[in-house]
Image: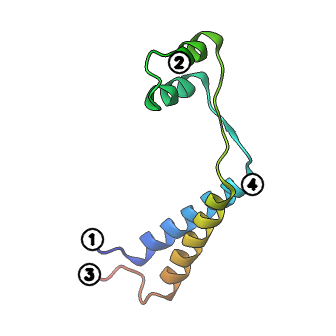
Amino acid sequence: MHFKRPQILLTGLLLFFAGVQFRLVESFTLSEKSSHVISAQMGDRGGALQSLWQAGGQRKTIQPPRWLGLALMSVGSVLTLKSLSMKGSGSSDR
């Protein structure tokens, strides 16, 4: 599949701003329903932890690693600069 200039630009900008978001936020608190789904996906099917989350209403907190934001920002900036250096607007057929 051949990506055109606007697609690469949009992907680069989205990755860059997602990286900025990960750098600015220290942790995410999930809702009770999403915590229940995560608990089920992590292998605690029918276990004590899942029943505690369901009954007690505890919410799961996710703390992404600090390097994740930098990695997303790096990849996003490379894709954005690559799209800006490409020839043409992507409207011509190849």
Instruction: Please identify, in this view, whether the residue under mark 4 or under mark 2 is nearer the observer.
Output: 2
Q: Residues within 10 Å of mark 4 (few under 14, many from 20)?
A: few
Q: Earlier in the sequence, mark 3 or mark 1?
A: 1
Which is nearer the N-term, disc 1 or disc 4?
Answer: 1
Which residue lies under the disc numbered 2?
A: 50
Q: Are marks 2 and 3 in contact (CB under 8 Å)?
A: no
- Tell me the kind of residue under disc 3: Asp
Question: Is 4 left, or right, of 71 in this rendering?
Answer: left
Q: At 61% across and 27% down in the image, what residue appears? A: 31
For the point 61% across and 59% down, the residue is 68
* Quadrant placement of the C terminus: bottom left
Q: Residues within 10 Å of mark 2 (few under 14, many from 20)?
A: many
Q: Where does label 3 land, which residue?
A: 93
At which x and y percent is residue 59? 65, 25
Q: Earlier in the sequence, mark 2 or mark 1?
A: 1
Tell me the CA gap for discs 1 and 4: 34 Å
Specify which label sits upstream in the sequence, 4 or 3. Answer: 4
Cβ atoms at labels 4 and 3 below 8 Å apart: no
Q: Position of residue 85 (x, y in %)?
A: 50, 88
Residue type highlighted by circle 2: Gln
